[in-house]
Amino acid sequence: MALFQIAEPGESAAPHEHKRAIGIDLGTTNSLVATVRSGMAVCLNDEHGRSLLPSAVRYHPDGRIEVGYDVRKRQAEDPKNTIISVKRFMGRGKADIAHVETLPYDFVEAPGMVRLKTVAGVKSPVEVSAEILKTLQHRAEAALGGELVGAVITVPAYFDDAQRQATKDAARLAGLNVLRLLNEPTAAAIAYGLDNGAEGVYAVYDLGGGTFDISILRLTKGVFEVLATGGDTALGGDDFDHRIYCWVIEQVRPQPLSAEDSRHLMMRCREAKEFLTHNPEAPISLRLATGEMIDLTLDAATFTEISRNLVSKTLQPIKKALRDAGLRVDEIQGVVMVGGATRIPQVQKAVADFFRQEPLTNLDPDKVVALGAATQANLLAGNKTGNDDWLLLDVIPLSLGLEIMGGLTEKVITRNSTIPTARAQEFTTFKDGQTAMAIHVVQGERDLVDDCRSLARFELRGIPPMVAGAARIRVTFQVDADGLLSVTAREQTTGIEASITVKPSYGLSDDEIAGMLQDSLAHAKDDAMLRALREARVEAERLLEACAAALAEDAHLLSAAEIEKIQAAADKLRATLAGDNRRQIHLAMDDLSYETQEFAHRRMDQNVKRALAGRSVDELSNPQPAGEHA
Amino acid sequence: MDLNADFFALLGLPRRFRLAAGELDSRYRELQARVHPDRFASAPEAERRLSMQWASQANEAYRTLKKPLARAGYLIELAGVDLRAETNTAMPADFLMQQMEWREAVQEARSAGDHHELEHLHHRLQADIAGRYEQIAVWLDEDADYLAAADGVRRQMFLEKLLLEIEDALAALEE
């Protein structure tokens, strides 16, 4: 049944169609999807009314791929083909993974990122994550009644470039248009801040299933400014389960456990942890395949004791973040708790003790990240709501640099720099007549290259031969608003330009992604060509709409002839949409983009002038009598 | 407006060391509100790229002008005077003497674990640094004496480094 739309007084009835945009919290243990409906962020539920989707993926021998509650419940049936907590493997090599010996998977070493051998073939963590994203995407499309314009996907603030890139690749593989990668604690701060009209300096303590983040933000009228962030991407609720698991093994000393028993026991440990949130003690009992019986009781005091150093491991990054922000503990106005593991009583107590105040828990710690992401998605998609005049200034969590002589790191961008950011550094040649230079990009805080994460290696070739030290090679690091890096190197002294731009890719090349995309589509019995055509059309329509909006606003910046040219290119693109030639659509899109380049410059110019407006020229040129330094 | 304009022009601020309270923050936010990539998420590719460049430049401008040391150094650079910060470390004997006394006092308090004394030194040094910025402000904004200012800035580098060392020592004591 269609309802009549009634506009608010003084507001015109929606001039543009509401765009379907979603926020996704892609969690270690659980994932969620949310959207903004009638100005309110809400989580979208499955057909049973549940908002959480367990981040568990099972590959069946018959080619079926299952995601969610049943998979988690029956994870001990087929541990090798049931992937849980896959987020821990994103952008990670086998050597990076904690407790790898207790995991039941058949790992395959691959450059950059581990793969998992399953009954459905060797899978990258990116592919496994894409299955979770697809499930949420379908849920959202069903709930919202059509194709989505895009999604904001959250990542731990402390995720490095490899982990962020892997997350974006997973979204691409799922066929989602990523509007932005958003840091989880920042998303929580948006949900919390807009909900409570908060102002001042806040800390967000985010302990999820597998990752820990601390972010310090300043909230001032409509601006969310991240001052510093810190954390540990291999610390979360899972580790508390693991501590209980080790405690049980120590008490019982059973025969080595089968993969199935190991999974069963881990599930019991997890249940015990959750039980202890509201009870003084928890039973742990399990009959093993050998017939041996485990029957123990874990009390709260023991749980606190065995997890003490996990809790204190979260306090170090807080101290560091406070120092980076130049703040003392007593300057923090409130502490927002995020993530399921913040329900653990000893975590709450430790945080309260550290900040000398009760943490804020009035928003559901499981949902708050997805709700914030949905709010941001709504804004980025261009849906106007009453509350849309806010700005988000986030930071990069880890320093980025280059290897220099002696295996040392030269930092180019320091941690907690506000993004997007671009910085350049100049280097020179080491030998006479040197024509190539090896560039090694690393991320991390340590001085030795070996202690940092290697992001990319590439070579700048075609440097004209000169004496050592004469060449000037400018290496520019650009970090975009998703926190993703690209690097450009250019020789500057001569007319001959040697230049290269790389995006670190961590073993997943564009071709590989294309291959995976083909595979997944073949499985879905969809037609890859048709899908690609449909995507091209959606993209073209988005471009046409953006151009029309720009023209409606700012046609005065163009001459009649220029408008005519743009409109001709737009008409040509529109004409190709009627056909089914994907190449022609792309070519026409390129033409239109080319014709609008100058327009883009003028529009940006106008924006900047407007930002500077309201000040007279006098004020700009005449010194003011009094002042102070920042 | 040119993307390569100097940072003061970029933010619509007068080119001087003394800034009115809160002015830099508000100019920066107003500019970001106009150029930030979040405002262009659905825009054509060319506009998104431009927005990233402008927002990056706005961040760099803010970072440079926010801290007095970097701001003073930038003004000196704009005036065409070489700060020679890396090569010119020659300082008059009395300044070096003073430096050594400071360092000895910090070292003593650190090894004695004297939190109170460290706090006291920190406070004194901060006041000293603030006073020197008053002088640098006069050189830059009134006298246009960039050589004197450059000399002052080189001294502040020493002092601010020492300030950081005291902060490190304080943090280490709190562990």
Image (spheres, coloured by chain):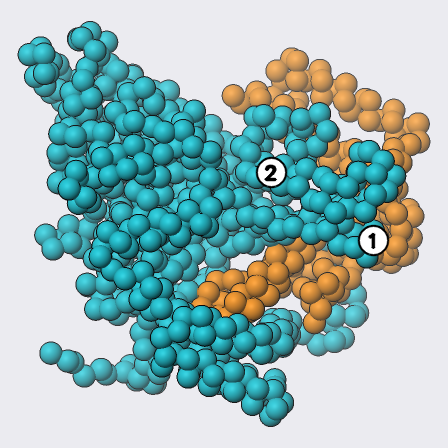
Q: What's the CA distance linking mark 1 and mark 2?
A: 24 Å
Q: Is mark 2 on a helix, strand or loop?
A: strand
In percent of the image, x 88 and y 47: which residue is there?
A: B82
Across and down, in percent, residue A23 comes to 32, 56
Binning the other alpha carbons within 10 Å of mark 2 as few (below 14), some (14 to 19) or many (20 upward) gives some
The residue that appears at 44% across and 74% down in the rendered structure is A585
Q: What residue type is labelled 2?
A: Arg
Check disc 1 and report its element: helix, strand or loop.
loop
Read off the chain for label 1.
A
Of residues A35 and B49, which is closer to you in this image?
B49
Residue that mark 2 sits on: A457
Circle nearer the N terminus (1, 2): 2
Q: Which chain is cyan?
A: A
- Res A283 seen here: yes
Residue A209, picture quadrant: top left
Residue A630, compared with residue B158, is above or below; it is below
